[in-house]
Image: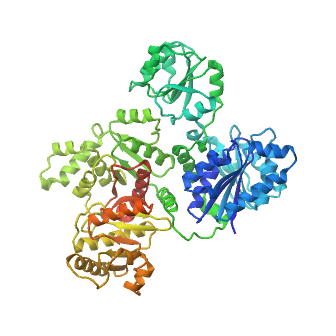
């Protein structure tokens, strides 16, 4: 039977969308099929509801499993005519269609933002009961004292009890940072004795973006940068002389100024082009006043967007102050902040006990990636990213920090890195920036490198010069335990990333060769492909080494290793140099790891297809169900992983380097921000292993 969870706001502005997002993230790691339903949506098209779209995007949900119900206008009209039963009937019908495809459905109720909150509460309670859903109630502690927040929880419990709903959990959201602990201690447990989780107000979410503000106000862009995703961290109204105004200007401020104040327009533009002065998030020109054409031509080059509005400065400033950021805006960094807060404040194990969900059957790509993030969080590690002048790296770092995945250091000239981040609206708070050229660590690292490479006659001066390279500096941070792992390669070759590690990190005891695997995330399972990125033409001993390392990597990421040593021939049916080499490698694997299920030589079809396996290798413990695939050479492996990625729609995570004493991982130069996030998480998990310490 499908389990329904009704996320119900108990106060206006509860921020329940954060709860829905965190709940969905948790459930996708513990249930096979998750759905999402918003019975009442704010806009005119239920299918275009921002929260529905966010859930579809974030968790790869088809439209049949993430839907809206009625518009608020439709629901209001039915309430006015007293036809509540029609609301219930239509919502139950849609919910039933979603539930038919799901194991658990998250239902997000209304915001209690209408004129009659009591009517909306009653509507949510009725729907929860009619859908047979347990209620997860959300109380906002915004602008409340500790005692008031605790009392609000008691009041909410009494109201829910009177409505005879089945209460799953109570949560307090939007608490002041310095009140979270006190509220947690003060709030009284209900009859179940279960904890009430308290989540702080997140400025990363509540701060609106330029896009949200301009859309809400109906502003028209007339100049400047097209990036509207920057957060509005503050508002500055230009009602003073230029000197005083610039003194108050801050990074991320939204500047509101009459369109004819040429002095402020030029000064703000000049500030944004100076590394020592702040860059605003945007500029609103008020009063319908058009700037001088020459000034407008200058503003066309502004690194921030410029908008115009007909309203006066006071009205614009008041309206801007009323705009609040929303998770449903679809910005990944807002969702990342929400998921990070959820993971810090909610004991998922305890909450899952209340739900008693059936154990998932399949490992989907989405579940694998979400579990990967959770595993990285569970035992925090510190990762260095040497390519601080790559925007993708900075964006990924912000998401990783907001999701609370690991600690991060970024290498590069600090002023350059900060300028790049500021220009893109990237928040690097909490991330360590290190410039190798000025760092106090440079001399220490150079001395160690010179010592380790003395047999190659490397002088101290040469070592100091080498430590200016990000990959060498970052790898030495790993070697000396300043950080736990490194991820590089977004802007450099694989050789650039691996070479320093081969020079002084070296391979693990008993390992002959550094190799790589791709984690291939198919629709219903995870496969491991090796080696598809490093070794062009491994011999039999190296193939065996790659197979054992790949099996260990598979185990590390929750894949039961059944190893297929691939060739163009299966079993004893063929002979020749290449086949014989794979046959010898297979025997070596059996000697090295007699506990490991391994088969070879074997063709790919016999390794994955049970019917083919039955005819070619009947009785094999690997044929037809292989999970780890060892390719005979780089040409075969690289082409195969790309063919599967493109033709089968698989997500290829990697390459994941294996065999080194400490984790160093490579990126493709065509990598996306999401690729970097995943690779950092993988590196953090690798760093948790005793062999990587």
Residue 179 visible to an observer of this rendering: yes
Give above or below for 304 relative to 21. Answer: above
User: Residue visible at 86% across and 50% down?
Assistant: 83
Q: Residue furthest bottom?
A: 619
Give above or below for 292 relative to 150. Answer: above
Q: Residue furthest right?
A: 82
Q: How many marks?
A: 0
Q: Quadrant of the C terminus?
A: bottom left
> How far across and how far down the image is residue 483, in percent?
36, 51
Residue 245 vs residue 320: left or right? left
> How far across and how far down the image is residue 499, in percent?
23, 54
Give above or below for 405 relative to 591. Answer: above
> How far across and how far down the image is residue 624, in percent?
42, 78
The front one of 531 and 573 is 573
> How far across and how far down the image is residue 133, in percent?
74, 60
Q: Quadrant of the N terminus?
A: bottom right
The front one of 129 and 659 is 129
User: Residue visible at 44% across and 33% down?
Assistant: 422
Residue 134 visible to an observer of this rendering: no
Q: Quadrant of residue 526?
A: bottom left
């Amino acid at each position: 039977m499908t389990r329904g969870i009704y996320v119900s706001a108990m106060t206006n502005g509860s921020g329940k969308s954060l709860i829905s997002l965190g709940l969905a993230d948790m459930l996708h790691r513990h249930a096979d099929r998750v759905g999402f339903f918003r019975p009442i949506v704010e806009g005119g098209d239920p299918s275009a509801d921002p929260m529905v779209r966010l859930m579809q995007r974030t968790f790869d949900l088809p439209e049949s499993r993430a839907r809206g119900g009625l518009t608020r206008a439709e629901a209001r009209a039915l309430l006015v005519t007293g036809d509540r039963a029609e609301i219930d009937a239509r919502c139950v019908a849609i919910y039933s269609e979603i539930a038919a495809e799901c194991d658990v459905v998250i239902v997000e109720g209304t915001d209690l933002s209408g004129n009659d909150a009591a009517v909306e509460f009653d509507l949510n309670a009725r729907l929860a009961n009619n859908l047979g859903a347990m209620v997860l109630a959300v109380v906002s502690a915004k602008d409340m004292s500790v005692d008031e927040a605790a009392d609000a929880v008691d009041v909410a419990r009494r109201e829910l009890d009177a409505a005879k709903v089945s209460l799953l959990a109570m949560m307090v959201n939007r608490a002041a940072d310095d009140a979270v602990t006190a509220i947690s201690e003060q709030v009284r447990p209900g009859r179940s004795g279960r904890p009430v989780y308290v989540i702080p107000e997140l400025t990363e979410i509540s701060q609106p973006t330029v896009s949200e503000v301009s859309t809400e106000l109906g502003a028209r862009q007339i100049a400047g940068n097209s990036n509207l995703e920057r957060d509005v961290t503050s508002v500055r109204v230009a009602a003073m002389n230029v000197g005083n105004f610039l003194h108050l200007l801050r990074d991320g401020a939204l500047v509101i100024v009459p369109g004819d104040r040429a002095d402020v327009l030029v000064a703000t533009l000049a500030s944004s082009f100076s590394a020592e002065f702040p860059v605003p998030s945007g500029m609103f020109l008020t009063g319908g006043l058009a700037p001088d054409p020459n000034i407008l031509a200058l503003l066309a080059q502004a690194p921030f967007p410029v908008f115009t509005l007909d309203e006066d400065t006071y009205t614009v400033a008041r309206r801007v102050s009323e705009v609040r950021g929303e998770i449903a805006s679809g910005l990944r960094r807002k969702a990342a902040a929400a998921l990070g807060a959820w993971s810090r404040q909610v004991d998922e194990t305890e909450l899952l006990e209340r739900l008693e969900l059936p154990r998932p059957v399949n490992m989907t790509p989405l579940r694998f990636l979400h579990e990967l993030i959770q595993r990285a969080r569970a035992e925090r590690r510190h990762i260095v990213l040497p390519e601080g002048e790559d925007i993708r790296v900075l964006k990924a770092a912000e998401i990783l920090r907001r999701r609370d995945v690991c600690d991060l250091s970024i290498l590069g000239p600090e002023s350059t890195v900060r300028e790049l981040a500021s220009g893109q609206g990237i928040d690097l708070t909490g991330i360590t920036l290190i410039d190798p050229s000025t760092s106090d660590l440079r001399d220490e690292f150079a001395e160690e490198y010179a010592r380790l490479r003395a047999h190659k006659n490397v002088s101290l001066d040469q070592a100091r010069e080498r430590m200016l390279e990000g990959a060498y500096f970052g790898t030495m941070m790993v070697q000396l335990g300043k950080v736990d792992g490194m991820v590089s390669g977004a802007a450099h070759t694989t050789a650039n990333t691996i070479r320093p590690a081969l020079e002084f990190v070296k391979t693990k005891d008993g390992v002959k060769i550094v190799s790589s695997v791709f984690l291939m995330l198919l629709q219903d399972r995870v496969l491991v492909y090796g080696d598809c990125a490093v070794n062009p033409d491994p011999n039999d001993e190296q193939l065996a080494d790659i197979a054992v390392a790949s099996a260990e990597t598979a185990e590390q990421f929750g894949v039961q290793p059944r190893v297929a040593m691939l060739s163009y021939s299966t079993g004893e049916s063929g002979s020749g140099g290449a086949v014989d080499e794979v046959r010898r490698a297979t025997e070596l694997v059996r000697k090295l790891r007699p506990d490991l299920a391994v088969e070879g030589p074997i063709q790919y079809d016999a390794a994955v297809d049970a019917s083919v396996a039955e005819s070619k290798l009947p009785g094999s413990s690997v044929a037809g169900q292989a999970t780890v695939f060892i390719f005979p050479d780089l040409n075969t492996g690289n082409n195969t992983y790309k063919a599967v990625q493109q033709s089968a729609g698989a997500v290829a995570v990697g390459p994941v380097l294996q065999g080194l004493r400490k984790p160093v991982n490579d990126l493709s130069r065509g990598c996306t921000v999401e690729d970097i996030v995943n690779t950092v998480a993988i590196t953090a998990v690798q760093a948790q292993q005793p062999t990587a310490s």
